[in-house]
Image: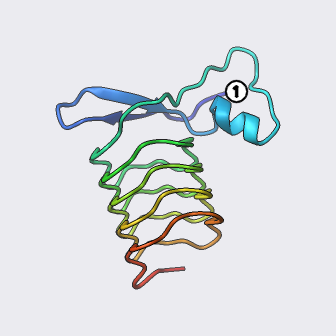
Amino acid sequence: MKVKKMVEIKNKDGEVLMVVAPGFMSEKRAHRRGAREPAGVTDLVVSVDLRGVDLRGADLRGADLCGANLLGANLRGADLCGADLYGANLLGADLYGADLRSADLRSADLRSANLRSAYLRGADLYGADLYGADLRCLRE
């Protein structure tokens, strides 16, 4: 399998916290889908604390962020189209204008998240907690 691009997620000091490779599945994601990972493919999304990380405008299309802790993260204008955010902690996250089309947000914690002007067409929000989330001006 050829990887088109790797996305490094860094903290404010420029330290790499994790690497996301679109198209790869974490063990949790593969298990949920009843699949096994191909030989030689490792779990690239690890349990890392991404609270408050600044990912403004990041290209995270198709990223596997299943169960990620993104509490208070800045994801303004980020491209999360088709991303797997199943069970992710997005409490208080800023997703203003983010592209979440076809994203898997099932069981995600989106309480008090800013989803104003976000694109949500085709996103799966089954079981997501949206209490107190700003859902004004959602876009198609």
Name which residue lies at 36% across and 67% down: 112
Q: Residue furthest top?
A: 40
Could you say whether the residue bearing mark 1 is in a helix, strand or loop?
loop
- 131 up-or-down from 64: above or below: below
Coloured how? rainbow
**Residue 97 percent across, percent down from the top left:** 38, 70
Which residue is located at x 50 percent, y 49 percent? 88
Q: Between 91 and 27, which is closer to the camera in this rendering? A: 91
| Residue occupying image coordinates x 21% and y 30% | 14
Residue identified by numbered label 1: 1
Give the residue type that dot 1 points to: Met
Question: x%, y% of residue 71?
Answer: 35, 50
Q: Is residue 54 visible?
A: yes
- How many marks the image carries: the answer is 1
Q: Residue at x 57, y 65 (%)?
A: 101
In percent of width and height, residue 74 lies at 29, 55
Q: Quadrant of the N terminus?
A: top right
Q: Is residue 133 left or right of residue 23?
A: left
Q: Which picture quadrant has residue 43?
A: top right
Residue 91: give x, y in percent of width and height. Answer: 38, 57
Residue that lies at the very extreme toward the right in this rendered image: 34
The answer to whether 31 appears left or right of 61 in the picture is right
Answer few, some or many: residues within 10 Å of disc 1's Cα (few below 14, many 20 plus, some between 14 and 19).
few
Q: Can residue 25 be seen in the rendering of this structure?
A: no
The quadrant of the rendering that contains the C terminus is bottom right
Residue furthest bottom in the image: 137
